[in-house]
């Protein structure tokens, strides 16, 4: 089993750059997204950029609420290959686009 780097907030500005660097260095990457609709275009773009990637070298996981510890607990129990976590996600207020205070 190869080691996987988990990048949270996969559609964010910072995450896109982190994923790009990891893939260019040959890492296996899993990125978190809030929905399949947000994930699939991002994943497809990276496979276009890196056509020689193995099918399982870049995957995604749906985490609807990044502050919900149970969602991450379930993810880590289900995927024992995750050895690194790079947190780039931030909870934002959908009303104002500002960081939430909770």
Image (tube, rainbow, N blue to C red):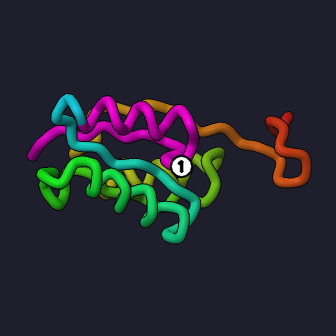
Q: Is residue 102 above or below residue 38?
A: above
Report if residue 17 lies within the magenta region.
yes
* Residue under the image location 24 percent in, 41 percent down: 4
The extreme bottom residue here reads 37
Residue 69 percent coordinates (x, y): 57, 46
Report if residue 77 lies within the magenta region.
no
Q: Is residue 94 left or right of residue 34?
A: right
Can residue 102 be seen in this snapshot? no
Which element type, helix, strand or loop, lies under badge 1? loop
Range of magenta residues: 1-23
Residue 27 percent coordinates (x, y): 20, 36
Quadrant of res 22: top left
Please name the residue that numbered disc 1 is placed on. Answer: 11
Near-viewer residue (95 or 67):
95
* Residue under the image location 54 percent in, 53 percent down: 70
In the picture, the quarter occupied by the C terminus is top right
Can residue 96 be seen in this snapshot? yes
The extreme right residue here reads 96
Q: Residues within 10 Å of mark 1 (few under 14, many from 20)?
A: many
Residue 42 percent coordinates (x, y): 44, 56
* Residue under the image location 53 percent in, 70 percent down: 37
* Residue under the image location 28 percent in, 41 percent down: 82
């Amino acid at each position: 089993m190869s080691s996987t780097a988990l990048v949270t907030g996969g559609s964010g500005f910072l995450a896109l750059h982190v994923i790009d660097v990891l893939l260019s260095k040959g890492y296996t990457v899993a990125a978190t997204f809030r929905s399949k609709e947000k994930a699939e275009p991002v994943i497809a773009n990276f496979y276009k950029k890196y056509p020689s990637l193995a099918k399982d070298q870049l995957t995604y996981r749906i985490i609807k609420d990044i502050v919900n510890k149970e969602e991450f607990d379930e993810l880590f129990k289900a995927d024992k290959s995750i050895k690194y976590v790079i947190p780039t996600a931030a909870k934002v207020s959908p009303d104002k686009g500002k960081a939430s205070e909770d």
